């Protein structure tokens, strides 16, 4: 195995996931903090052309982001487990981790299969509405969740579930790394993923100026000009944080800003934030890296160019349901339809958190729904 290097920043939750993945697979690596070390950041850009972390380099292989399928291809191993778990929980965000605490306390044999630990909450700069904390970073809060789960007897697999089928009264759960696991019940807690801009060239500039994680990649844009696309809480909090790091922050807002008053007040304190409203990003420009965006006025149709080195899409999320399509009923928004007790229309399959039709998409709600799903799993298994 050639020498492995992980280019990371301290704030980046996905960097931590890459390192955890390598450690789990006993792969030695060198950790390079490009947020703190400017020369190392330049080395990373020169070597990889990337303005986003994590980047993992092993010989000729270069893996961008916490890409479980690619990491598994390069470092992981396949296999097949024969144990039948009482429950397999898909996803280790607030919903999945809380569900796991409850199922193990009910002495149910539990496996979690998740692409990362912590979920979306890891991307939050500051959480001010989770009880017990006046303010806490997403990473710190989710580390507490993880710590609580690590003390329990839970099988945790960092992998992506690709499909679930029924097999002789159990569920056969298949993963990307070609493993299969059996369980008597399933909790789907796969949450949501960030929506992409949908502009031509987005893939070309991915990690080369285009990002959906300002918490991760923000430090690489110190004293540069960036754009934040969106007008909700996530966009406004990203703009506040980037205003401290970048030289100039352009907010591209499609219609109106719909964020909490507390965030709006803080945004106004920053003179280096310009709000462009009502505008949509219509094009990306640059050669090997992003150097600018074109924005279109949604009322007049007029277009203008803005020179930026980075653009962060903070325009909402879509549910992660690919693995359960066809197994459970979905609503028009692609969310799993659940009743008030987290039951889906498929007996033995439960769902909790942001992936479901429950309206509130918040950590405290997801955690509560995870607890409910676990209790319902216990009732279901007792009745079998
Ligand atoms: C930038 C940002 C800031 C936020 N700030 C706040 C805040 O201040 N307060 C608040 O209450 N909420 C906040 N939220 C919302 C909050 O993070 C979510 O409501 C919460 O994380 C939902 O938890 P969840 O467990 O349902 O899903 P997620 O957190 O999305 O977790 C889903 C998990 O499932 C995994 N997964 C997905 N697909 C698969 C698959 N096929 N196989 C295996 N694993 C899979 C993912 O890797 C992840 O671990 C914020 C969200 C964002 C993005």
Image (tube, grey):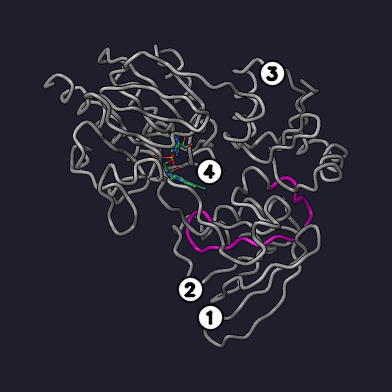
Given contact means CB atoms under 8 Å apart, are the residues at marks 3 and 4 in contact?
A: no
Q: Nearer the viewer, residue 267 or 181?
A: 181
Marks 4 and 2 sit apart, C-alpha to C-alpha, by 23 Å
Q: Quadrant of ligand 1?
A: top left
Residue corresponding to mark 4: 124
Residue linked to disc 3: 27
Tell me, for residue 255, which label it has, or none.
2
Can you tell which mark lies on residue 298?
1
Could you tell me which secondary element the residue under label 2 belongs to? loop
State the CA–CA distance, disc 3 to disc 1.
Answer: 50 Å
Q: Is residue 233 magenta?
A: yes
Residue lying farthest to the left in this orientation: 383
Asked if the residue at tag 2 contacts the one at tag 1, i.e. Cβ–Cβ closer than 8 Å, the answer is yes
Write down the region rendered in magenta. Answer: 218-235
The tag earlier along the polypeptide, 4 or 1, is: 4
Q: Are marks 4 and 2 in contact (CB under 8 Å)?
A: no
């Amino acid at each position: 195995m050639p020498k492995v290097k992980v280019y990371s920043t301290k704030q980046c939750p996905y960097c931590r996931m890459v390192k955890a993945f390598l450690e789990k697979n006993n792969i030695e690596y060198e950790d390079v903090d490009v947020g703190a070390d400017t020369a190392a950041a330049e080395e990373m850009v020169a070597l990889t052309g990337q303005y986003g972390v994590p980047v993992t380099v092993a010989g000729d292989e270069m893996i961008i982001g916490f890409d479980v399928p690619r990491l598994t291809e390069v470092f992981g191993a396949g296999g097949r487990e024969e144990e039948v778990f009482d429950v397999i929980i898909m996803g280790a965000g607030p919903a999945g981790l809380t569900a796991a605490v409850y199922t193990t306390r009910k002495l149910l044999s539990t496996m979690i299969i998740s692409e990362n630990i912590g979920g979306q909450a890891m991307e939050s700069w500051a959480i001010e509405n989770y009880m017990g904390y006046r303010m806490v970073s997403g990473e710190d809060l989710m580390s507490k969740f993880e710590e609580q789960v690590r003390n329990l007897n839970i099988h945790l697999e960092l992998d992506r579930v690709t499909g679930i089928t029924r097999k002789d009264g159990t569920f056969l759960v298949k993963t990307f790394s070609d493993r299969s696991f059996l369980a008597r019940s399933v909790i789907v807690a796969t949450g949501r993923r960030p929506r992409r801009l949908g502009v031509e060239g987005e893939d070309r500039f991915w990690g080369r100026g285009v990002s959906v994680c300002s918490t991760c990649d923000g430090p690489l844009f110190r004293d540069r000009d960036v754009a934040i696309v969106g007008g909700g809480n996530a966009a406004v909090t990203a703009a506040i944080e980037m205003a401290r790091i970048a030289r100039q922050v352009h907010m591209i807002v499609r219609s109106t800003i719909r964020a909490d008053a507390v965030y709006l007040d803080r945004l106004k304190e920053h003179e280096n934030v310009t709000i462009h409203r009502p505008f949509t990003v219509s094009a990306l420009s640059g050669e090997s890296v992003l150097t600018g965006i074109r924005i279109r006025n949604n009322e007049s149709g007029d277009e203008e160019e803005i020179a930026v080195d980075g653009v962060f899409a903070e325009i909402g999320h879509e549910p992660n349901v690919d693995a359960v399509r066809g197994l459970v009923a979905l609503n028009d928004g692609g969310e799993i339809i659940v009743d008030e007790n987290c039951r889906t229309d498929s007996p033995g399959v439960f769902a909790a958190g942001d992936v479901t039709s429950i309206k509130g998409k918040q950590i405290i709600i997801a955690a509560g729904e995870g607890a409910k799903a676990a209790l319902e799993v216990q009732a279901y298994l007792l009745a079998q």
